[in-house]
Image (cartoon, helix red, strand yellow):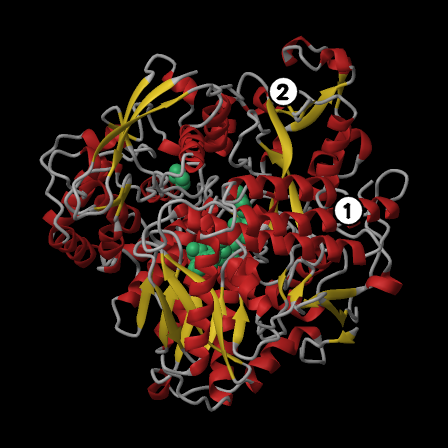
Amino acid sequence: MSSIHAKDPTGPLENRWEKHLFNLSLIAPQNRKKHKVIVIGTGLAGASLCATLGEAGYQVSSFCFQDSPRRAHSIAAQGGINSTKNYQNDGDSVWRLFYDTIKGGDFRARESNVYRLAQLSGNIIDQAVAQGVPFAREYSGYLANRSFGGTQVSRTFYARGQTGQQLLLGAYQAHSRQLENDNVTHQSRSEMLELIMVDDQARGVVVRDLVSGEVSAHTADCVVLCTGGYSNVFYLSTNAKGCNTSATWRAYKQGAYFANPSFTQIHPTCVPPTVENQSKLTLMSESLRNDGRIWAPKNSADCTKNPADIKEEDRDYFLERMYPAFANLAPRDVASRAVKLICDKGLGVGSKIHGKRLGVYLDFSAIIEKLGLDAVAEKYGNLFDMYSSITGENPYQTPMKIYPAPHYTMGGLWVDYNLMTTVEGLFAGGEANFSDHGANRLGASALMQGLADGYFILPKTVANYLAQNTLTEVDDAHPQVVQSLKAVKERIQKLMNAPQPKYSPEHFHQKLGGILWEACGMSREADRLKQAIVEIAELETQFWQNIKVTGIDNDLNQTLERAGRVVDFIELGKLMCQDALMREESCGAHARVEYLTEDGEAKRDDNEFSFVGAWEFMSEQPKLHKEQLNYEFIEPTVRNYK
Amino acid sequence: MNFTLHIWRQKNINIAGDFVTYKIDDIDEDTSFLEMLDQLNEQLIANDEDCIVFDYDCREGICGACSLVINGYPHGDKKATTTCQLYMRDYKHQTELWVEPFRAKSFPVIKDLTVDRSSFDNIIQSGGYISVHTGAAPDANTVLVDKPSADEAFNSATCIGCGACVAVCPNASATLYVAAKITHLSLLPQGKIEEKARAQKMLNQMQSEGFGSCSNHRHCERVCPKGITVSNISKMNQILAWS
Ligand SMILES: Cc1cc2nc3c(=O)[nH]c(=O)nc-3n(C[C@H](O)[C@H](O)[C@H](O)COP(=O)(O)OP(=O)(O)OC[C@H]3O[C@@H](n4cnc5c(N)ncnc54)[C@H](O)[C@@H]3O)c2cc1C
Ligand code: FES
């Protein structure tokens, strides 16, 4: 086991980023157009990066797999975005957001990075407002805020329940503005399938045109992956169907370390599955927990009753009971485990899926009585509409039902303070990197991180890399380029022509999801993880034996796309289990059953596990590297939400 | 539930397409419309056939990727919903379903039910933004926006760019789409300055992409999954009239 270092600056925390910025090399405006950067992914992180780099004058080529950058998964973020503006004068500050993020991440994130994130958070809101993002406002015309996901200050900016949509459209429009200028180009319906390495540096990508099926190489001075998270490894998640790990997984296989893959967040407030062949789960924004009360029947006999017929004294408001200080706003992992516990005890409500009722009530009757229907509709109208269109039930009249679902992945490509991976010239931003959320992410902090990376950090650190490296020209005839193209084509042929084609990609994906949800979901245990590793290895063998892709490869073929993504998920799933097994402690969202207190609180082990686990790909077994975490400014405390 | 599906199959833009009839049985009423198509595709894979291609991503009505014309209606006949938000319980009484792509000259069919909507991106690129540099914006609260304008701007900004308005329009016009963006940005002080030039550029681009112009049929607002109204078009016309 070796150690790795973030190369973050030293000295007072407040000055680190500024000092670092001063030390980064610059490129004169007239020289910028000589440098080419490839950006994969145009969600919040990627689109904001393209806009900023394009405006600075660099040549930028971006790619996304949807039919337009405006459809990236960021569009679905509902609740809001954090910022330390302290407009509400309720005691918020850069320090407090920094502290909350480190603590929320259960002391598994890097102090320098998180402090920088909090510092940049103010400017993000300025930027978004200048672009015309229509955030919610007070009658005075000033920006409105709300408290979100367990924080005791109101630092969240929001645009009704569609904050991600509005922020993404802002970034998309800024990106579009640059596309009018010749330096920036973009290709939609294109999927990156390989990273091109030349002399140990990332110098390009192989991309498949999803319409024609044509595979082509694109070279540049460096590559940035802003390809989002991998919650879909669980098959059912709140992520958009297309979200995948393929870009980050190809990078891993080319030498970029993958950090904390088992740190995945399960969100407590999702619409429960109602049919066995459900294709995805829908999140109901956590902001609902500000005003809704969560309960389940005390007696299993009541589980099939109409909730209105269950007497007040027969209702168990279990979060209020178990965690009186935070009650319904208990952190996501704590709330999710409590919900699962209730359902596992047979006190769940709703449809039976594989023999269990997977749901508890989220009840708005008290707040409707207090504020009136209109006020509640103003705040949550579109979420209530969404719920009723999915379930056919009216949440103004009958309580919603919720159940936890995989939602966000804190793990991702390991990056240093410059957001560069362990591969020279390969950067990662947004949910694709592991950077700032430790073992658990606070609500409304992912949008903030993606935009901090894209608007403010990567443009500076990428420029520094370009300034410091003299790179030789790489053209399409370069042996590495030719080799990478060939490898991609061979892999496609392998997917198209399994020895005994039998099962669709969905079949394998559902199997993988089932294994991971039980072994590497909300609670984990050594024996179960070991067994899962064996099962996933078998699944991988079966996949290559039996994968069935119909149609042809030189065509728009969604079955082929899915097959390629699923097999990358299978490999990642194995690494997640290995990581969860290695980490013999509970921290944040990682709950190892062996390391929980009697009432289910995480037992963190700072002596042994205060590190980032970064995995290096090896053909036999992945190799673990540790980035030791040193807390100079905040003393790790035991998280206690009682 | 059992359904008879007539689905538009077309190899590509150069080869004429046609409806192909499929049967699908034992569908749970809580299955979504797209999950029903997923199940049909699983059947096709089992029969060694090429799957039906259709666009989707979020499956929760916000990304604008899904399309489809179902029994003559873009996104089905249910009000204010996208195709991905339809459930088979909505089709209890229509067990024979005709499923086609959005049809418009500026949305050429790529394959089966998938169309090319990059013309929408081109319209935004022509001017659908505020020309602000990144990195140096003033403090957000230095520009105040009265709440009614902010709320109205938000309503216009909720357009998901799906193209249903074009698909339903006899002129295949994108006026509602263009007007929603113009209205969103014009209602905010920071977007007001460029409003005339923006409106002109976007409308010119709309024309050169081959979209028709508006002749007040108002079908667009009926099918818009986000309830964007034709008042956006009046607003746009005012902006243009002042120029
Ligand atoms: C339902 C939901 C609600 C959420 N709500 C909130 C919230 O209220 N507040 C908050 O802070 N966070 C929220 N989050 C989290 C947040 O939305 C995401 O973490 C964030 O938007 C990720 O942004 P991104 O730019 O990193 O990636 P994405 O937006 O996922 O973009 C990924 C991009 O990469 C492209 N891509 C991926 N793979 C490839 C490939 N192989 N080749 C080419 N292109 C590729 C895609 O096309 C896309 O353009 C929510 C998440 C979900 C699921
Ligand atoms: S799939 Fe996103 S709106 Fe329908």
Specify which label sits upstream in the sequence, 2 or 1.
Answer: 2
User: Residue A342 in the image: x percent, y percent?
Assistant: 76, 27
* Image: A183 above or below B38: below
Q: Amino acid at mark 1?
A: Gln
Circle 1 packing at 10 Å, graded few (<14), some (14-19), many (20+), is few
The relative height of residue A552 versus residue B45 in the rendered view (above or below) is below
Report the side of A511 relative to B217 (left or right).
right
Q: Nearer the viewer, residue A516 or A530?
A: A530
Q: Residue furthest top?
A: A309
* Image coords of residue A513 (percent x, y): 62, 42
Residue placed under numbered mark 2 in the picture:
A350
Where B164 falls versus A27 (above or below)?
above
**Mark pair 2, 1: CA separation:** 31 Å
Question: Badge 2: few (under 14), some or many (20 or more) residues near its Cα, within 10 Å?
Answer: some
Q: Residue at x 66, y 8 (%)?
A: A309
Horizontal and vertical percent position of residue A609: 83, 62
Answer with left or right where residue B205 lies relative to residue A435. Answer: left
Identify which amino acid the numbered label 2 is placed on.
Gly
Which residue in the structure is indicated by mark 1? A531
Give the side of residue A210 with respect to residue A570, left or right. Answer: left
Q: Looking at this view, is A220 or A100 the one in front?
A: A220
Q: Which mark is residue A433?
A: none
Indicate the chain on which mark 2 is placed: A
Q: Is residue A176 left or right of residue A517?
A: left
| SS for callout 1 | helix
Mark nearer the viewer, 2 or 1:
1
Q: Nearer the viewer, residue A159 or A192?
A: A192
- The image quadrant where one finds ligand 2 is top left
Local SS, label 2: loop
Residue at the far front: name it: A499
